[in-house]
Amino acid sequence: MRYSKPQIILHWLILLLIAITYSAIELKGFIPKPNPWHDYVKIIHFNTGIWVLILMLVRVYLKKKHTSPAISPTPPAWQTGLSHLAHSLLYLGFIALPILGISLLFIAGKSWPLLGISMPTVSTPDKDMAGSIKNIHEWIANTGYFVIGIHAIAALYHHYVVKDDTLIRMMPKK
């Protein structure tokens, strides 16, 4: 048994958007500031982050609506527990990151375009609060690299070593 088609599509679409979001912010570090591409990759980072938030909220809704298909054969309880923990961290992290990013820009007084519409900011920026939010945002983002890696390694481990249907449940039908 597999996840529903919308859940599978969202899983892979969100992965693509997260990869773009991470790539854009990493690429920004290699582009000097006077260059217009520096601002362009920041805008890509912001906008794909917003789409991650929206689609993650849809995923939460679908997760509540549909039961997860059972893994066959059933894994040990400790693996199921670690799986739930990793998935919770992924959901929380990729919902919190865009919220923190929006908060950071708003409190720092930095306007940014969302699909061409300029987003509002506070009239009096709070640089200390913005710095604190930025640190939390970056810590969660850096932790995300590891949680995503563990998630991918676990899926491959289940597929190639344990030979259960963990990975197949999230793959599109052929």
Image (cartoon, grey):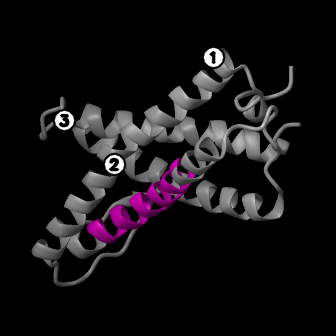
Ranked by sequence position, the earlier of labels 2 and 3 is 3
Rendered view: 48 above or below 28 = below
The residue that appears at 64% across and 46% down in the rendered structure is 80
The residue that appears at 75% across and 29% down in the rendered structure is 171
**Residue 29: which disc?**
3
Helix, strand or loop at disc 3?
loop
| Magenta highlight on residue 104 | yes
Residue 106: horizontal and vertical position, in percent? Answer: 30, 73
Total of numbered circles in the picture?
A: 3
Quadrant for the N terminus, please.
top right
Q: Amino acid at mark 3?
A: Gly
Q: Amino acid at mark 2?
A: Ala
| Magenta highlight on residue 124 | no
Which residue position holds label 2? 141
Closest to the observer, 81 or 13: 81
Badge 1 density bin: few <14, some 14–19, many ≥20, Cα 10 Å: few
Q: CA distance from mark 2 to mark 3?
A: 15 Å
Which residue position holds label 1? 161
Question: Given contact means CB atoms under 8 Å apart, are the residues at marks 2 and 3 in contact?
Answer: no
Q: Is residue 79 left or right of residue 100?
A: right
Residue range highlighted in magenta:
86-105
Helix, strand or loop at disc 2?
helix
Res 115 visible: no
Quadrant for the C terminus, please.
top right
Q: CA distance from mark 3 to mark 1?
A: 38 Å
